[in-house]
Image (tube, rainbow, N blue to C red):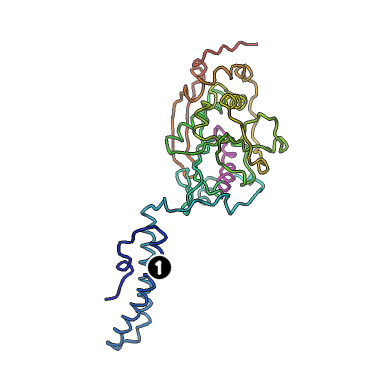
Amino acid sequence: MGLSAKKIAGSCEGTYNACIIGLLVSATLVYALNLKFYHSISKIHGNMKNLSDIIQQTFSQTVSKRLIWTQLFHDRNFTNTLERCSWPPKYLHGRETLNRTVFDLEDLNEVFTFMKDGHYKPTNCTPKQRVAIIVPYRDREPQMKIFLNNVIPRIYRQQLEFGIYIVEQTSGVPFNRGMLSNIGFKEAILDMKYDCIVIHDLDILPEDDRNFYTCADNPIHMAVKVQQFKYNLPYKGFAGGVTTFSKLQYEKINGFSNQYFGWGGEDDDLFTRMKKNNYSLIRPFEEFGHCGSIKHQQANKKNDRLKILKYAHKIWQRDGLNNLKYNLLIKRLKQLYVWIYVNIDMLNVRKSLDIKLKNE
């Protein structure tokens, strides 16, 4: 009888690469042996006419078995044998103008087929970090589509494992970006052991894929040169737009304050929390930190943020992750993101602290 690659490979053990090399050698040997075998058979039966067909069929079967075995070894989850993804990544594009076209989600799903359940993991190497991108959201569907179409390909080229969380607040009370960020953090770490948490505005998007979605020993500010500020840093303590934290860093500063309803204030409060914990907000990718701005209807800037900021240095240890309360209505896995839909009770949030806001 003819020999098979499976018989020669036997119980292949050792590293993945060694096994694959062995299978390739086996396939070559099988081809040679089977060629001789079928040549002999054809001589005996005087059926040289079909010899080429027999050889071709035998070789095809051998290659097919090799491919089956290759897939088998992949399926055995040889995660530990994968080399680390190159760093810095090899196939970056550098700075590119944002694509502001609003595509349907169905079209984006067809383009980004590598995404599943709002998550992506490189298949040919071990990523540098696992990253959760948290996006506070309400009533900005066109901007969300532009966000997905620009952020996904850039972080994909960075060969990071990542998940995208769109955290949506119900209507009824003013938007609370800080609290939605905390909710996104809580829900994301329930899903996976993420190395890095990125708090990402929907309307400030990196233009350069050399501006990495990664974490370091200190929090990283990615939105250094924002278009709406004429590609300048508005002030030294600006921490808005896109900021990354390790899980430990975010927990140590107790996340964002939950008290800021309406526009602004939460980023300045966040900067105070970082200073209180001896963190420096670093900008290691400043040279590549250009971020485009996506236009949207301006939020109402009249609120009590300045009054709350006066208490920031006093209340940060008891206002944030450790007193977070919300009503989770929906958590749904979509192809490109995880949709988290929550209700926030503003009255109870304000009652959770003994802050007395006097009307002026």
Q: Position of residue 97 (x, y in %)?
A: 67, 47
Q: Quadrant of the N terminus?
A: bottom left
- Determine whether 165 is above or below 170 in the image: below
At 70% across and 36% down in the image, what residue appears?
Answer: 228
Residue type marked 1 = Leu
Residue 289 in the image: above or below residue 76? above
What residue do we see at 49% from left, 16% from top? 352
Counting from the top left corner in percent of width and height, residue 127 is at: 49, 47
How many C-alpha atoms fall within 10 Å of the one at disc 1: few (<14), some, or many (≥20)? Answer: some
Please, what secondary structure does the residue beneath circle 1 have?
Answer: helix
148 magenta-colored: yes
The quadrant of the image that shows the C terminus is top right
**Magenta residues, as a range?**
135-154
In the rendered image, residue 124 lying in the magenta stretch gets the answer no
Position in image of residue 141 (x %, y %): 56, 38
Q: Nearer the viewer, residue 4 or 353?
A: 4
Instruction: Look at mark 1 in the image and give the residue it sits on.
Output: 24
Magenta stretch, main secondary structure class:
helix
In the displayed structure, would residue 181 be above or below residue 127?
A: above
